[in-house]
Image (cartoon, grey):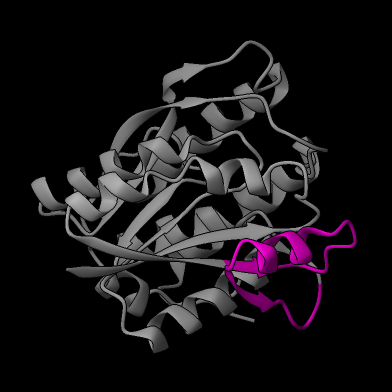
């Protein structure tokens, strides 16, 4: 049996967390040979998210140093490396991603002999209204820019559904604060010549309030892509 961390980054996700955890395909993962543990990294939630996580028996890490998804994920990755687990799957616990797709990402990772697998929303199907027109266009533009800059195909740069082998996490050097973290993870994988593959997924309407700001966060993501194209390691 191999050990898997399922990482759920949160900030005020009380409406979706329990629903997502309930949908994790525990039996299927065990049949595939994975022991898994649920880890939540919380970015200063005030709505009872942490209490729900504790009630569900999850391992909870409180984010330190300020608000931002990037900060939380970087801290969670350090804990993962210390754990010794062989693989990590991360997904947002807001109901937009279906945990039932976790085995598909892991199977692709094993079968394709690759280091990283993403769940692609833009190659899959979306519920009506799950992604607004501005975000849909912005995701395409940012993805096209990433492929043009790094020459490594990806169809959905900003997805929040990733699977990593341990070696990929250990090799990444990151300094993102906010939602540009996925772009930096992609850039770091490209610099380290990691093999990235993907599977199409279904994208659902979120439970709770959206936190991504279309224009402001899009600019941060584009800036991160440009900076990391010319710097193998992040600069402060």
In which quadrant of the rendered image does the N terminus lie? Answer: bottom left
Residue appearing at x 37%, y 37% in the figure: 101
Residue 148 in view of the camera = no
In reply to whether residue 47 is colored magenta, the answer given is yes
Query: Front-most of 49 and 123?
Result: 49
The span picked out in magenta is 40-66
Would residue 160 appear left or right of 102 to someone viewing this image?
Answer: right
Query: Front-most of 55 and 48?
Result: 55
Using the image, determine if residue 168 lies above or below residue 187.
Answer: below
| Residue situated furthest bottom in the rendering | 82
Residue appearing at x 59%, y 25% in the figure: 204
Residue 139 lies, in percent from the top left, at 57, 32
Residue 174 lies, in percent from the top left, at 51, 74
Residue 46 lies, in percent from the top left, at 90, 62
Query: Front-most of 18 and 183?
Result: 18
In reply to whether residue 117 is colored magenta, the answer given is no
Residue appearing at x 64%, y 81% in the figure: 236
Would residue 53 appear left or right of 173 to someone viewing this image?
Answer: right
Residue 4 in view of the camera = yes
Residue 177 lies, in percent from the top left, at 69, 68
Please give the count of numbered marks on the rendered protein.
Answer: 0
């Amino acid at each position: 049996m191999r050990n898997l961390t399922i990482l759920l980054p949160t900030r005020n996700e009380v409406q979706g967390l329990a629903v997502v955890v309930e949908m994790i395909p525990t039996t299927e993962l065990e049949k595939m040979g994975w022991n898994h543990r649920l880890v939540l990294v919380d970015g200063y939630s005030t709505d009872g998210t942490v209490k729900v996580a504790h009630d569900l028996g999850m391992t909870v890490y409180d984010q330190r140093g300020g608000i931002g998804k990037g900060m939380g994920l970087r801290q969670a990755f350090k804990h993962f490396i210390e754990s010794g687990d062989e693989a990590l799957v991360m997904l947002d616990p807001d109901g937009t991603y279906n945990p039932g797709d976790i085995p598909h990402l892991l199977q692709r990772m094993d079968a394709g002999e690759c280091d990283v697998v993403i769940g692609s929303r833009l190659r899959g199907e979306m519920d009506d209204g799950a992604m607004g027109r501005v975000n849909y266009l912005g995701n395409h533009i940012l993805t096209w820019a990433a492929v043009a800059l790094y020459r490594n195909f990806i169809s959905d740069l900003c997805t929040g559904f990733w699977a990593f082998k341990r070696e990929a996490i250990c090799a990444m050097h990151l300094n993102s604060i906010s939602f540009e973290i996925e772009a930096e993870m992609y850039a770091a994988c490209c610099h380290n010549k990691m093999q990235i593959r993907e599977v199409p997924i279904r994208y659902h309407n979120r439970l709770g309030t959206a936190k991504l700001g279309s224009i402001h966060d899009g600019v941060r993501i584009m800036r991160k892509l440009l900076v990391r194209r010319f710097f193998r390691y992040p600069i402060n």
